[in-house]
Image (tube, coloured by chain):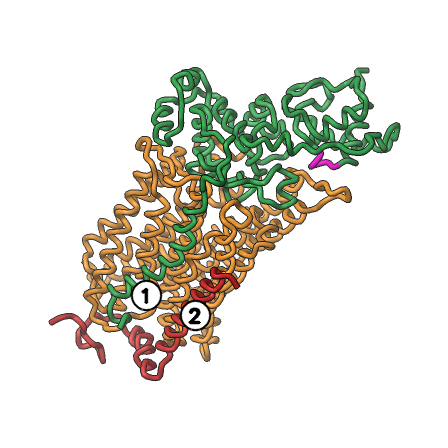
Chain colours: A orange, B red, C green
Amino acid sequence: MNQQEGYADDIVKGFVIWSMVWGLVAVLVGVFISFQIAFPQLNFPPYLTYGRLRPIHTNAGIFGWGIGSFMAFFIYITQRLTRTSLWSPGLAKAQLWLFNIVIALAAVTLAMGMNRSKEYAELEWPVASLVVVLWVIFAVNIVMTIVKRREEQMYISLWYILATLVGVAVLYLVNNAAIPVSLTKSYSAYAGANDANVQWWYGHNAVAMVLTTPPLAIFYYFLPKATGVPIYSHRMSVVAFWSLIFMYLWTGAHHLLWAPVPDWVQTLAMGFSVMLIAPSWAAVFNGYFSMNGQWHQMRENYLVKFLIFGITFYGMQTLQGPSQSIRTFSAFIHFTDWVPGHVHMGTLGWVSLVLFAAIYYTIPRLYHTEIYSIPLANVHFWLVLTGQLIFSITMWIAGVQQAAMLNATNPDGSLHYSFIETMVELYPYWHMRALGGVIYLAGLLVFLYNIYQTINGGKTQAAAQRA
Amino acid sequence: MDSASIYYLGVTLILFLVFAAIVARTYSRKHREKGEEPKFRMMDDDKPTDENKGGRDVRRK
Amino acid sequence: MIEKKPIIFLLLATATILVGTIITMVLPFRWINDPKLAIASVKPYTPLQLEGRDIYIREGCNNCHTQTVRPLLSDTERYGEYSKSGEFVYDQPFLWGSRRNGPDLARIGGKYPDAWHVKHMKDPRSMVPRSNMPAYDFLNRPLDTSLSERKMKALKFPYTQADLDALKGKSEMDAIIAYMQKVGNDIPWRKTGTAAVLGELKNPFQDNMSVLPEGQKLYAEHCAQCHGIELAGEVGPDLRDLDQPDAKVFATVFSGIAAGGMPAFGDTLGKERTWKVVTYLKSVHKH
């Protein structure tokens, strides 16, 4: 066993590597479906149509790449912040197996059309049940490790980790409640507008508990580690923590503005979405102020570049999000390409940049070596940044253009464009988006090559030392 | 103002007071040192040893 | 304090999360789907419609098509009457969607005749040039009805043996079209919503040859899928040598014929462009 100084780190390696595999799948499928939108003849029914592949893209991204790497870093971070080895490495090993089985099953069943249709909760009930088992195993292991810790106080990352564990559990259980018909088919336990309200309570808080709190835990841990300087204010992060987890849960209905759910639910969602700017930006300021006197590291330290750009995109995301939550603006851009542009700034910009930094930081340490190539890491950075910006910016423009066309009227009050007339104008933007996706994919391949060589180098060095 | 509005206003005020209490406690002079301690201690956590400098061992002996 | 007590911290964090959850997610159950908001004419799905809905879900149609018309001009003018919560009480799951890569389908029921849907599913671009919808020709395979009865029972929908027997020999295409013809069609909005044509119906472009190119272009975009680019008819009837006064043709294009499957184009085209189409139609003859 290659256990580093008492911490169970072999299992971290497994989760990091597999999350990268699923991340590659998510991006490959994403690039493919972006081409399908621009070139419909690339749909190969029944299994390879946009309708069946898009859930595979989102599930592989959120659960394969996202949750997989969060599991890796929660295990890594928790052990260090508690100065304790993992409660049960054996359980974690079982968890890695189950994780890969679940994600693979998800991909296969979704391609076969076993799909509950609720976004980010598409998995049919047998697979969803396995997700619950997976999460319980994971949560117990982390909580028990924290309970038997040697460090008296919990650093902010542990706060976010604990909130994630309980938040995801509540969300997933409620929204996946189903009436099974057979092993491969079930119906939602809720109907119509109720189902919609439950779904978007879940959907938006998947953004909170999967795409916000875990990356924040990781950011708060790896930024000080990368810069060598403590975080600016632990107490500010504490105030922001309570505000964030309190307010997020009220905001789901901003996905349902103008839909037939009660008006007051929509209004509350709108108000709380705007208020969320405060705790979100507390994290952004905490990141920026931690860089006081350290800004030169943006040039010298590639990890810092990933992390600070990541938190910057988080800041922009948490300004753009609340603005979209306002009724009038939502009326304009909702249902257009603006929204995928927004989402991908968060997932490709914020979440993935922070995860890249965490992987670059941990992999050399786990394998007792140095990173294979810093220039390649810089190439990776610029490629994924360019790809993501092309994606998001073209989608914002496309969304505004389509919204403006959809709202254009003739002097007699009739609409100026039919739907299809507005849609065909989007093709050039869809070509641009596919290009952005290809550039992002190229960056990801550079990253994977760099990590592969780093791990290889570590193994060769270890072998040389033994010889 | 009808009763519902007064009720909502009350809830809002209570929420604000809870928030103010969290801020006051977190930023109290008494709490200052403890509140900022974890950010320094996490900088050196690569060795899970008992004799780590200044580390309080909270395990039940 | 809580920084040192993970279990107490966990409970506090859970309580914090539950406040917003209870108020915005649990409490609305009291108001949503309230019997007072029920719409008597909204009926549960028949076995065939339910099978069609399951195919809609299986193929992930909701990834590109929404099913909510918002009470906004650009939505109601384009798609029809805005959606009401009482219309969705039998929708488990809801299928409102989140992105319109294609048009909203909340009011698709009764908009086109079945034959239109068959052609469109087989080859979307033959009906809507430059559409990016995948072709769903493969839905012509037989419908799997092995679970139909259990599905109806699971959802507690009423059905008869005759309903189940009627599934025999149906294709998946039949099912999804049966479903789409029901969507949004349970309230009588098409009849009450039809724009009455007021004022004098006199063609402002009578004998004005200069509008013919635009009329032809509009015809190619909006009418040719059903009536053929040569007006010889296909899904819809032959339109050459129309033996009707301009005002009658205008009323048909503007308001549609609900019973005959002719959609209303008044909302999309407006009066002026409708008159241009009418002028073009009247100018085309069988040699």
Residue B32 visible in the snapshot: yes
Q: Residue at x 30, y 79 (%)?
A: B34
Query: Which residue, as the protein is rendered here, is positioned at the far bottom?
Result: B29
- Please tell me whether residue C139 is drawn above or below residue A6 in the rendered image: above
Q: Which of A179/C32 is in front?
A: C32
Disc 1 residue crowd, few under 14, some 14–19, many 20+, Cα 10 Å: many
Q: Main secondary structure of the magenta part?
A: helix
Q: Position of residue A201 (x, y in %)?
A: 42, 51
Of the numbered discs in the image, which one, if any, rests on residue C267? none
Of the numbered discs in the image, which one, if any, rests on residue B16? 2
Task: Answer with the quarter of the image where residue A157 lies.
Answer: bottom left
Q: Is residue C44 left or right of residue A103?
A: right
Q: Residue at x 47, y 45 (%)?
A: A30
Three-letter amino acid code of the residue under disc 2: Phe
Q: Which of A374/A180 is in front?
A: A180
- Name the chain letter of the residue that bears numbered label 2: B
Task: Give the quadrant of the C terminus of chain A.
Answer: bottom left
Query: Which residue, as the protein is rendered here, is positioned at the far right?
Result: C207
> Do labels 1 and 2 touch, CB within 8 Å?
no
Q: Which of A449/A229 is in front?
A: A229
Q: Which residues are magenta?
A: C266-270
Three-letter amino acid code of the residue under disc 1: Trp
For the residue labelled by badge 1, is the local secondary structure a helix, a strand or a loop?
helix
Task: Answer with the quarter of the image where residue A231 lies.
Answer: bottom left
Q: Are marks 1 and 2 on the same chain?
A: no
Q: Position of residue B23 (x, y in %)?
A: 39, 75
Of the numbered discs in the image, which one, if any, rests on residue A159? 1
